[in-house]
Image: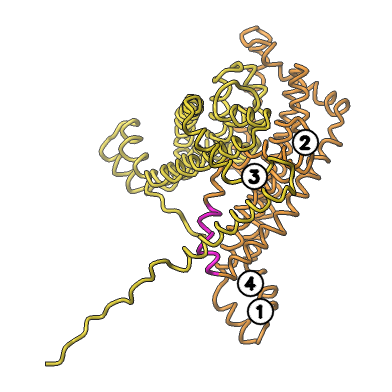
Amino acid sequence: MMTLRGYRVVPFALGLGTLILLIAAMELLIRAGVVNKFIVPTPSQIGGAFSRVIAEEDIPHRFLVTAREAFWAAVLLVVFGIGIGVLLYRVQLLRAATETWVAAFASAPTVLMYPLFLVIFGRSEKTIIMMGFIAGLPAVILKTIEGLSGTRRVLIDVGRSFNLTEFQLFWKILFPAALATIFVGLRLGMIFALINIVGVEFLINFGGLGQLINDLAERYDLAGTYAAICFVILVSVVFFFLTDRLERWLRPAA
Amino acid sequence: MAETGRLTAPAAPFVGPVTLVRVAIIAAVLVIWEAVAASGLLFRDVVPSLLVIARALVELLTDPSYYFNLGVTAGEIGTAMLIGGLAGLAVGILLGANPLLASAYEAFLYYLGPTPKIIFFPVMIMWFGVGPGSKIAMGVISCFFPVALSAAAGMRGIDRVLIRVGRSFRLTTWQMVTKIYLPAMRMPVINGVRLGLGVAIIGTLLAETKLSNKGIGFLIINAYSTFNMPRMYALLIVLFVLSIGVNALVGRFGGVETRKT
């Protein structure tokens, strides 16, 4: 297949072409009255609403609010997620007793606890940060345990032959060897956290980008709502893409 | 004649150390909870006594309206899984079977999959109204992506020999799907369904908490609005048990072993 700088041109053109065709078809269908323009605005209206929403709704500030919430959730995930993971790796009995609980917790719909956190922390950033943190915690714990347990025996033996202390063994052997897997956990955790952060912002009508969508929808600003949704999708895709690249960059080091 | 002794494993202790640790953790959590509830450190009723929560749990489970609302939510999630799951399976098989289509479109699924789906709820309300339709739609768009991606990966993982055997028997496309593809990709599909079910439950219930007058999500937000904390705890406990149970059941149904990391 024809390639250009590593990208396959034909599939790329097909994917992009289909997207453009769909947008064009939607524009025509709405203009022709086949699709109700009071339910779905034309793509050109949505495109035009972008600059208006960015200017009038202070998107940069809202983006920073969501980013700040994501940052604090990430800090909590690093401290508690990796911390608990290391603890469970070190204390095998505790790991045997609780690992299945952590896995079960991962499949529980924890985001439904947001009314509980609203009562505890109020309608504030703390609630949103905690919801993000809780959503990402099981993935970070499980992947930290997996990464540390997957360290090759020979590396640990080399460390012991150099008479490394337990502290040195952890920082010089175990942690670097497990870093790639731990990062996979952090990436997964951050994806879950970001989904919850934007979701809870939307649900409690507080904070950054999630609140913006709720605000615009309540004002029945159709084009603005669609533009804000597109913006959040764009942010989410860029975040996912960048962390994906970072993970691939870290992988060979494992 | 010398008597040969039979090798026997030492009798296992009645309660293993793992069970003991588990019991100790649960007991510690319950004691701390009760102590916090009695201390009045937090606002009154934010952490109610365990006895009060247990009473609320019994009241909830004996309340006929709870089962009506559970039925509404289960119906919405079931319909969402049926529509989203089948659509995801069809798209996954299509992408997995055709490398060109996979290269062209799978990136869309891969990158759109992790976006927060609840942001589509205002659009779903406009398209499907404030009734169960918009909640089902939320469940559909939530579960579609994991099922489609798992099915595509499963399709690519099918042993080529099986496909060649099917073709040598001149099976029709439908026969290939039902006799070769689906049985061979059962495990990844079941995994995808498990993931899809989890996010469909979340999508549907979140939509119910935002705008609804029935369903478990509505009950939770209603308990919050009336500051009925024991009932909210009872609802969350029941919901977590049901979700984890259904997830484990789907896994067992497909013979999926819970992988220990």
**N-terminal label among 4 and 1:** 1
Residue occupying image coordinates x 55% and y 68%: A149
Residue bearing mark 2 = A123
- The magenta stretch is A92-103
**In the figure, residue B177 lies in which quadrant?**
top left
Q: Which chain's residue wears label 1?
A: A
Q: Residues within 10 Å of mark 2 (few under 14, many from 20)?
A: some
Marks 4 & 1 on one chain: yes
Expressed as whole percent of the image width and height from the top left, the position of residue A176 reads: 67, 69
Colour of chain A, in one word, is orange
Task: Please tell me whether residue B70 belongs to the stretch shown in magenta.
Answer: no
Q: Which chain's residue wears label 4?
A: A
Amino acid type assigned to the residue bearing label 3 in the image:
Phe
Query: In this orientation, does residue A144 appear?
Result: yes
Q: Nearer the viewer, residue A185 or A235?
A: A185
Residue occupying image coordinates x 11% and y 92%: B1
Residue bearing mark 4 = A174
Amino acid type assigned to the residue bearing label 1 in the image:
Glu
Colour of chain B, in one word, is yellow
Determine the CA span between mark 1 and mark 2. Answer: 44 Å
User: From the viewer's perspective, is the residue at label 2 or at label 4 nearer?
Assistant: 2
